[in-house]
Image: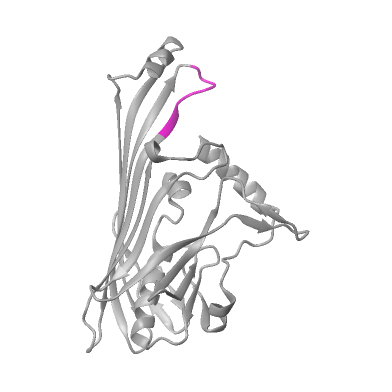
Amino acid sequence: MRNLFLIILVLVFTGSCTTVKVAVPGAFSEAATKMKVKGVNGWTVNQRLSFGNYKTSVVKRGWDFTSTVQYTRFNLKPEEMLLRVFEIDTDNRRNNQRGKFQFLLEDGNLAADIFATEKFSEKQLVYKSNNPFIGDVSRTDRYEYAFSAAILPLTATDHDPWSLVLVNRYDAKKDTARGLFDRRYVEEEGYVTNGKETITIQPLRLDKVTTRNGKDTKIFGGKMLTGYELRWDDGVVAIVDILDNTIWLANDLDAKDKLILSSVSSCILLKRMQDVEKDKDDF
């Protein structure tokens, strides 16, 4: 319920603002190439991505799996026993979702095979009311989202596979958010590695937008996820804009490194969930 209320506020609010964009550092943008990605949105049958001189094969997706199990709670806390006085019962609910996809990415000379999986699990507390005006309300106690991918370069000199990992965890017991518009505390981790080199993946969030009259205004509900920053040897080498479906690649990289970064960026744009807290109900 809280998430739905915040999403409505964000949609109404940003609708009156100018286009929300990723904040790309000036020094990086001057030494990088911006590429608009085609094929992310719209019809996903025979879906293909293309950007710059890169293009994918048809993205093959496996069956998405979803399961929900709800069961009555027998060990009740004092506050839950009090709710029963008002004819409000509580249940546990477990949601599990997963999906997978694969594709080939090439730039005309080099190519890589990519195999990706996406998993989400959630534990909720459901408040059941006999009042038709209230209905059922759920609260998330904890969840874990894990996105992983294997990137296999198809080159004569580089056969080392790369592993991509993005993890997002939430535990209500660790949550420090108290206000209605405070963003939940989540644990996030992202990286790509071949066992020798490691590229970190950091989410980019925006807490202010510019209205049509030029005024900077804070976004309700905490910072909005706008994209991801890829860092190699503590330097920015790529930026993925998930709002504008755009990839920025540093110019001073060799073709093999650009292929890996383009593979990672393509995976990020193709995954079902972007902002896990807001997208989990639609996965």
List x then y, in percent, for residue 187: 38, 50
List x then y, in percent, for residue 64: 31, 52
List x then y, in percent, for residue 23: 58, 67
Indicate the quadrant where residue 254 lies: bottom left
Lateral position of residue 100 relative to residue 206, left or right: left
Lateral position of residue 206 relative to residue 147, left or right: right
**Prevailing SS of the magenta stretch:** loop
Q: Residue at x 44, y 87 (%)?
A: 252
Asked which colour scheme the image uses, the reply is one colour
Lateral position of residue 33 relative to residue 193, left or right: right
Residue 172 visible here: yes
List x then y, in percent, for residue 270: 40, 64
Q: Residue at x 38, y 54 (%)?
A: 188
Q: Spot the residue most to the right.
A: 213
22 w.r.t. 94: above or below: below
Magenta includes 138? yes
In the image shown, does 267 or 57 lie closer to the viewer?
A: 267
Q: Residue at x 32, y 86 (%)?
A: 110
Lateral position of residue 159 relative to residue 235, left or right: left
13 w.r.t. 178: above or below: below
Indicate the quadrant where residue 151 lies: bottom left
In the image shown, does 183 or 91 lie closer to the viewer?
A: 183
178 w.r.t. 111: above or below: above
Question: Which residues are the magenta region?
Answer: 131-139
